[in-house]
Amino acid sequence: MSSGTVLDSIIEGVRADVAAREAAVPFADIKQLAKDAPPPLDVMAALRQPGIGVIAEVKRASPSRGELASIADPAELARAYQDGGARVISVLTEQRRFNGSLDDLDAVRAAVSIPVLRKDFIVGPYQIHEARAHGADMLLLIVAALEQDALVSMLDRTESLGMTALVEVHTEEEADRALQAGATLIGVNARDLKTLEVDRDCFARIAPGLPSSVIRVAESGVRGTADLLAYAGAGADAVLVGEGLVTSGDPRSAVADLVTAGTHPSCPKPAR
């Protein structure tokens, strides 16, 4: 990973924030809290249902766009997503660039009965146990943020706690690394986290090279049903949508529109 990128800056802040949280709640304690948490839900079963699944995100802000939405009640938003037919709720917990928090994760977990994804920049084992302790069923592992040995270790640890890892890639080389690490759920992010530039064609380039056994998630760039259908035609099993929902004015209806398009008989089906 090259130095001085946007991603490097984010990770530097994440490491400092993790150290502060670990000073308050030691690793041994967070491990015990993770053990005591209710068992995680089956993410893969949720995403293998017929049609294109919608992962709906609680997203307050982003490095590229700044503040997106003032979300007074993340639980209410999550319930709206669930009522609209989302299969998974994604919750951003990174605080410096995305204005997220573990409090948001707690609120969402208590509000919905479907799987919940902790979306953050995972850089060490503490965060994995922390995610489980706060009720996450799955978490994000970003290939660009991890050396290969760390990626393998993080993936193994995630699965050892019964959670599912969404392994995020942006290039063919990163996709190869994800597969070598054993990823079975791969997200292709159209946004390069090192530069914040968007390449909307990267999913169509990467998805055909993934084995049919891998669940493929398209991340970034879904603003409506046309984008979902385009990703479906390129082989997506699911789409992750944040900005397009939190800025929609009616998140339940926005999710429902995507779900309807993704389950319509005319929607392209992933080759299996």
Image (cartoon, rainbow, N blue to C red):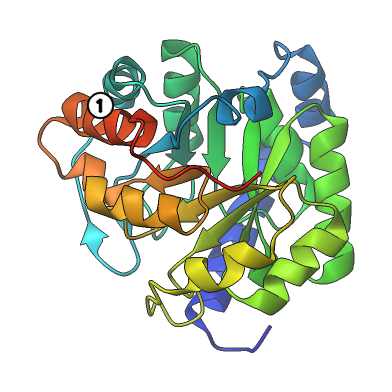
The foreground one among 57 and 103 is: 57
59 sits to left or right of 94: left
Label 1 neighbour load within 10 Å: few <14, some 14-19, many 20+: some
Which residue is more in the foreground, 248 or 51?
51
Task: Return the residue nearer the eye: 84 or 49.
Answer: 49
Does any portion of residue 25 appear in the rendered image?
no
Q: Position of residue 147 (x, y in %)?
A: 80, 71
Instruction: Give the percent coordinates (x, y) of residue 44.
Output: 67, 30
Res 15 quadrant in image: bottom right
Image vertical order of residue 258 relative to residue 195, above or below: above
The residue to which callout 1 is attached is 256
Q: From this view, report whether residue 263 is shown above or below residue 202.
A: above
The answer to whether residue 202 is seen in the rendering is yes
Quadrant (top left, top right, bottom left, bottom right) of the C terminus: top right
Image quarter of the N terminus: bottom right
Residue flagged by tag 1: what amino acid is it?
Answer: Ala
Question: What residue is at 70 percent from the left and 67 percent from the top?
Answer: 175
Which residue corresponds to the image point at 43% horizontal and 70% vertical from the top-left? 191
